[in-house]
Amino acid sequence: MKITMFESYEEMSQQAAERVAAHIAEHPDTLLCFAAGETPMGMFRILAAMQEDGRIDLSQARFAGLDEWVGLGPNDTGSCIQVMHDAFYRPANIPLEHIHVFDGLAADLTEECQKMENWITACGGIGMTVLGIGMNGHIGFNEPDVPVQNGCIVCDLDDTTKAVSIKYFGQPLPVRQGISIGLGSLIQAREVVLLANGARKSEIVHATVHGPVSNRVPSTLFRDHLCTTLLLDREAAIQIQKE
Ligand code: GLP
């Protein structure tokens, strides 16, 4: 894993967008998998602007939604699908038929997992994924201690994730599970970008870089992956710089 630090969130986001642009230039019909959450919002703004003025051409790319809260759908504020449509798919004019996401409202979650796995296979695997590191080191909804497996998973949410979830919904919601592309499939992506910004992430960034490699902290599993780059702003890097 390569680690690069930037002075500001904006510079980190710019670098993430430029990496996506470089990947698209080489593989125009790639499958991209972007996390929702607050971390990639700057990258989404920059990518939408690049698409608008022709610096990137996302018209042939395909998209796989990384994860979803079980029980939430597109009409629920803070659902991953709503966040992704508002922040990226719509502003970047991505055709709906190029996007496959989990339906958090589906009665049969095993079937949802299968449908996502079929989409990933049909697209030739994940070309590039841009992931946010959760406060507990989760990746998507691969929570601490999740089995490292290919395909997709339904995972019980960790207490930290339940507590943090209020920031997305604006109110406490009784979320208990998440559905996510699994760590095995993400690690197999041709290119992985991990993002973290802000002082509140500095502790988990330190654990990601220096702690034991273990599914106790899912983000550590990317450390030995040669095609992974960790992009940080100055505040998120504070603790690793003390080493
Ligand atoms: C959320 C989502 C992830 C996201 C991560 C970090 O719960 N399940 O997809 O990447 O946690 O979120 P944030 O960027 O808001 O800190």
Image (cartoon, helix red, strand yellow):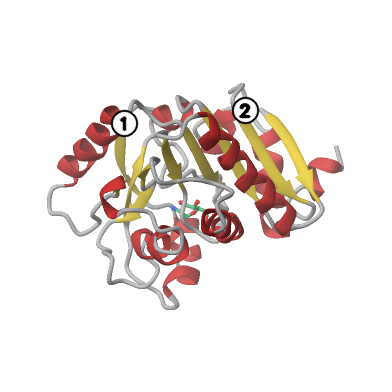
Query: Tag 2, which secondary structure?
Result: loop
- Give the image location of residue 26, x and y in percent: 53, 29
Residue that label 1 marks = 123
Residue sitting at x 77%, y 44%: 5
Residue that label 2 marks = 223
Identify the disc placed on residue 91.
Answer: none
- Give the image location of residue 85, x and y in percent: 38, 62
In the image, 7: left or right of 228?
right
Q: In 3D space, how far apart are the residues under numbered discs 2 and 1 (Cα atoms)?
A: 26 Å
Work out whether residue 91 can be spotted: yes
- Give the image location of residue 8, x and y in percent: 77, 57
- Give the image location of residue 24, x and y in percent: 51, 37
In the image, 117: left or right of 56?
left
Residue sitting at x 47%, y 64%: 87
Judge the density around disc 1: few (<14), some (14-19), many (≥20) Cα neighbours within 10 Å: some
Residue sitting at x 52%, y 59%: 52
- Could you tell me the amino acid type at mark 1? Cys
